[in-house]
């Protein structure tokens, strides 16, 4: 049997109407020396018995983990000390060898299910956890991040007050590696803004699980963009009206050298490329243009110019995708919006020689961009060609 395949007694696991006792600081193991503040020697207030006159909805949290022993105890305590009376907490570890298992054993009495065994990566681990979830509300919490104090009560109250909401999004603190800032998700005004994520950061975005189920399972080959993939497919099918917003902090996102977003940029880029390709296969023109602009132009401007650490091969792949998506639609300049995209693409000639070569292979587009104005371009074209 895999290490740690343990569950709580059945009464605690099935207690939807009679929740198990909420753990307090006195119940949990003593924090390591020197650890103070939330969630070490501070806990959330216990939630009242009812939420807006109803039983608290069951919230399922899944933590995928692999060799994050330095951080996972903080993650675990931030979930258990929420003071939330109807919580389901599942940890799926990929066979860590760094002390993670010892920490899981230490907290096993308060974790509904945990296992430590080799898996197929983060998406596979989340799928395994989701298969065991019985809650109405869901999110996964990576083992190097942690929830804000009182976050789950605020999420539950938002879902209860917005019965048609499919997602609840709140503020996120980004910290570590010299960073310490609050990210606020701006409400997308259109389906396209939602599809390009509009600033959604996964730790602070919670799902109504009935809205998530049709999108499952997560694609196992996606190791980095699985959250964007879910948001995109959800917004394509349902639009953005089902998103509710909380003007309060819900989670803390840790940047550090060992995190995937910091240490595996090349693989992160490859995942992004696959994501954009999938969007191109399945989506409309407007969606393709928006996604290419979001994940192409922005990446070129920010990542290639500032960081410059991605290989020439990855750069070439991204250029190919960007131009493969955009050029077929800007060859025939039919609107001010497409002309604006053309100006953004042509502007990249100044950034990189490869971009200049690709753009210059379409001289009619470079010539059209010289007018810098859709109205001037159309005026000159009508004078010369009568169209």
Image (cartoon, helix red, strand yellow):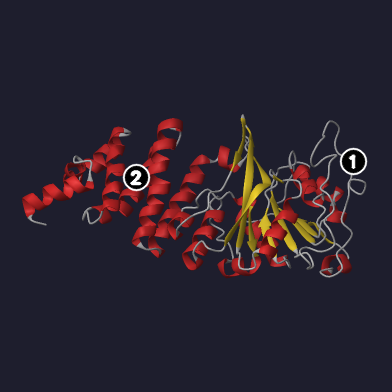
Along the viewing direction, whichever of 179 and 149 lies nearer the viewer:
149
Q: Would residue 17 be found to the left or right of residue 143 on screen?
A: right
Q: Position of residue 193 (x, y in %)?
A: 45, 54
Q: Position of residue 206 (x, y in %)?
A: 64, 57
> Is 314 or 153 nearer to us in this picture?
153
Q: Is residue 2 visible?
A: no
Mark 2 element type: helix
Quadrant of the frame with the C terminus: bottom left
The reply to whether the C-beta atoms of the residues labelled 2 and 1 are less than 8 Å apart is no
Q: Pick whichever, 297 or 49, lies toward us.
A: 49
With respect to residue 167, does 347 lie above or below?
above
Question: Which numbered disc, 2 or 1, marks the residue closer to the eye?
Answer: 1
Q: For residue 319, which numbered disc appears in the image?
A: 2
Considering every residue shown, the one lying at the far right of the view is: 26
Near mark 1 (Cα within 10 A), the count class, few <14, some 14-19 or many ≥20, is: few
Residue 31, by quadrant, is top right
- Secondary structure under badge 1? loop
- The image quadrant where one finds the N terminus is bottom right
Q: Above or below — where is 96 with respect to 8?
A: above
Mark 2 and mark 1: Cα distance apart in space: 53 Å
Nearest the eye: 210 or 64: 210
Q: Quadrant of residue 243?
A: bottom right
- Residue at 43% in and 32% down: 308
Q: Position of residue 180 (x, y in %)?
A: 63, 33
Instruction: From this view, report whether residue 192 is shown above or below residue 66.
Output: below
Q: Is residue 338 visible?
A: yes
Residue 375: image location, x then y, percent: 20, 48
Residue on which disc 1 sits: 30
- Horizontally, residue 120 falls left or right of residue 60, namely left
Point 67% across, 57% down: residue: 139
């Amino acid at each position: 049997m895999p290490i740690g395949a343990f569950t709580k007694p059945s009464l605690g696991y099935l207690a939807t109407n009679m929740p198990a006792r909420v753990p307090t600081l006195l119940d949990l193991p003593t924090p390591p020396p020197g650890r103070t503040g939330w969630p070490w020697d501070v806990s959330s207030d216990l939630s009242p018995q009812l939420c807006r006159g109803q039983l608290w909805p069951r919230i399922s949290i899944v933590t995928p983990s692999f060799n994050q022993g330095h951080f996972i105890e903080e993650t675990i305590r931030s979930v258990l000390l929420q003071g939330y009376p109807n919580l389901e907490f599942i940890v799926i570890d990929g066979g860590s060898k760094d002390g993670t298992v010892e920490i899981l054993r230490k907290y096993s009495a308060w974790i509904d299910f945990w296992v430590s065994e080799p898996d197929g990566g983060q998406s596979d681990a989340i799928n395994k956890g989701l298969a065991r979830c019985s809650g109405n509300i869901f999110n996964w919490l990576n083992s190097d991040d942690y929830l804000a104090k009182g976050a789950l009560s605020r999420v539950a109250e938002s879902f209860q007050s917005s019965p048609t909401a499919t997602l609840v999004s709140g503020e996120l603190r980004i910290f570590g590696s010299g960073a310490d800032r609050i990210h606020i998700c701006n409400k997308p005004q259109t389906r396209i803004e939602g599809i390009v994520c509009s600033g959604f950061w996964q730790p602070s975005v919670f799902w109504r699980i009935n809205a998530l189920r049709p999108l499952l399972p997560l694609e196992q080959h996606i190791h980095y963009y699985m959250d964007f993939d879910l948001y995109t497919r959800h917004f394509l099918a349902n639009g953005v009206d089902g998103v509710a917003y909380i003007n309060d902090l819900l989670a803390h996102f840790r940047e550090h050298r060992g995190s995937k977003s910091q240490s595996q940029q090349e693989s992160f880029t490859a995942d992004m490329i696959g994501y954009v390709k999938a969007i191109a296969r399945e989506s409309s023109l407007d969606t393709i243009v928006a996604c290419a602009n979001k994940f192409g132009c922005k990446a070129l401007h920010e990542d290639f110019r500032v960081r410059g650490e991605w290989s020439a091969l990855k750069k070439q792949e991204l250029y190919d995708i960007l131009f493969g998506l955009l050029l077929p639609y800007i060859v025939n300049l039919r609107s001010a919006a497409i002309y604006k995209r053309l100006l953004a693409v042509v502007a990249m000639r100044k950034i990189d020689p490869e971009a200049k070569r690709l753009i210059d292979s379409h001289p009619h587009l470079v010539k059209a961009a010289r007018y810098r104005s859709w109205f001037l371009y159309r005026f000159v074209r009508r004078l010369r060609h009568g169209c």
